[in-house]
Image (tube, rainbow, N blue to C red):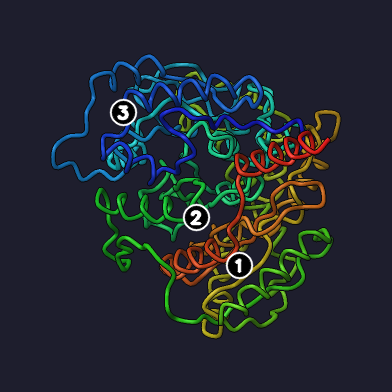
Amino acid sequence: MTDFTVNSMTNDAMGDCDASGLAKRIANKEVSIAEVTDAAIARAEQINPKLNAIVTDCFDLARQNTKNATLKSGSTAAFEGVPTFVKDNTDVKGLPTLFGSRAVLNRPAKRNGEFTDQMLSTGLTILGKSTLPEFGIPPTTESLAQGATCNPWNTNHSSGGSSGGAAALVASGAVPIAHGNDGGGSIRIPAAACGLVGLKPTRNRLVNMHGTEALPINVGHEGVITRSVRDTALFMAEAEKHFRNTKLVSLGHIQAPGKKRLRIGLVTGALKGINVQPDVQRTLNETGLLCESLGHSVEEVAFPFADQIADDFLTYYSFLFFSMHRFGKFVIGPGFDSSKVEKLCAHLSNSFIGNIGKLPFVIRRLKNTINITQELHKHYDVLLCPTLSSSAPKNNYMLNQALPASAMVKNMMEFAPFAALQNITGEPAISLPMGTSDNGLPIGMQFSAGYGEDKTLLELAFELEEAKAWKHIHEMAANKKTKKTTKKSLA
């Protein structure tokens, strides 16, 4: 731990509870919804000057709505009264949706986004909107519109992206659960950077991100970032009550490890030019050994994709941002000013113009990646690889405005080369905090499974959480304080 750590947990109505524990305290009337709301707001106000994780708040409205709130008799909402934040690319009625961009007009949304309603159906109380980089493009939450969102483990470092504000708020203890969405790793990347649980569900298991169902490949997935596996599992069970895709097997409420021993493929290697840092490689090996010690079969698997896939990813995502840049008034809304987009977005948009003719072939090749992963899943229930090639870099490294945009793209791809695959295939993947870097930051490992096999991942995650007993910021801070006190008493 460093002096740059931000931890808001204290002996208030929230304590050190995760979302499930806090909901239980509310249900048992140990604390009121109003007390919990006040405590969360106080924490958010304490940490935000240090972390810069909140774009817009609705604290007064939340207080007003929860002032006289009591748990409704017979209520089945599992997270009734638990505070949360919504990522600022999703509409919340009465709050602006700014997408982390100076190009977007600041005006209140007229209605909730579909996923906002799905979140609210679980009983969560919205306190405001969390930060993201411009249009959720980079894997670090830094923008000219809102600045950098810092990592609670060390504020000199990035919180990851694009759901970096959500991860910072959860890791620091301001709220126990927060909304994220994932178009190329944007739930899993900040979860890994901040030592949290981040599940990208199977495509279409939750309601879709607005407009993504019209894309040639729907890469956008909604979800949450949490401190515990049980919170993620409970959220998925509750969200299913609001919307259930009948084409997928129902998850139900997963509460414990599975009994089946799994065949796990430990993916070695990476795309050309990607260097996995030694502490990440060490954590990957340790995670494989841990899985073996739990009775699972672990076998090394060579990275199964040709280097062409990196160019295909980049071309397809450039197409998405070209559409955003050139047709923002239709995609985002009236008042969009394309002249105000940042250098990175403009670069990706402009670079796509020279590749328009390649797009049909790129889409065909990307769609075919599911054939490769399906073949792998005939032999392996789960694939294991790093979530990121390194721990979180320092702020202003990846998107240093002095760099040419092409160098920013290179930095992004080197940092997060593993996560986008499951956005293309639609398969589920989860990042779990499985280690600590040489400089004391969390290291996440990614576990992915076949289409619809979210249950397999959550059951394995429960088992690994129990075996690893991973630490969060407040526990590390408590250990540091104890050590200091002990030294002082011995002096």
> Dot 1 corresponds to which residue?
365
* Mark 3 / mark 1, whichever is N-terminal: 3
* First of labels 2, 1 by sequence position: 2
Query: Which disc is residue 63 wearing?
Result: none
Tell which of 64 and 336 is nearer to you: 64
Q: Which element type, helix, strand or loop, lies under badge 2? A: strand
Q: Position of 229 compared to 379: left or right?
A: left
Q: In the drawing, does residue 382 fall left or right of residue 396?
A: left
* x 49%, y 16%: residue: 106
The residue under label 3 is: 33
**Neighbours of disc 3 within 10 Å: few (<14), some (14-19), many (20+):** many
Please state which amino acid type lies under the numbered disc 3.
Answer: Ile
Q: Residue furthest left?
A: 73
Label 2 vs 3, first from the N-terminus: 3
- Quarter residue 295 falls in: bottom right
What secondary structure is found at the residue carrying circle 1? helix
* Quadrant in which residue 236 is drawn: bottom left
Quick check: 329 above or below 22?
A: above
Name the residue type under label 2: Lys
Q: What amino acid type should be assigned to the residue bearing mark 1?
A: Arg
State whether residue 301 is above or below residue 406: below
Q: Pointer 2: what residue? A: 200
Residue 193 appears at what percent x and percent y?
A: 67, 46
Neighbours of disc 2 within 10 Å: few (<14), some (14-19), many (20+): many
Q: Quadrant of residue 433?
A: bottom right
Q: Nearer the viewer, mark 2 or mark 1?
A: 2
Give 380 or 261, whichever is nearer the viewer: 261
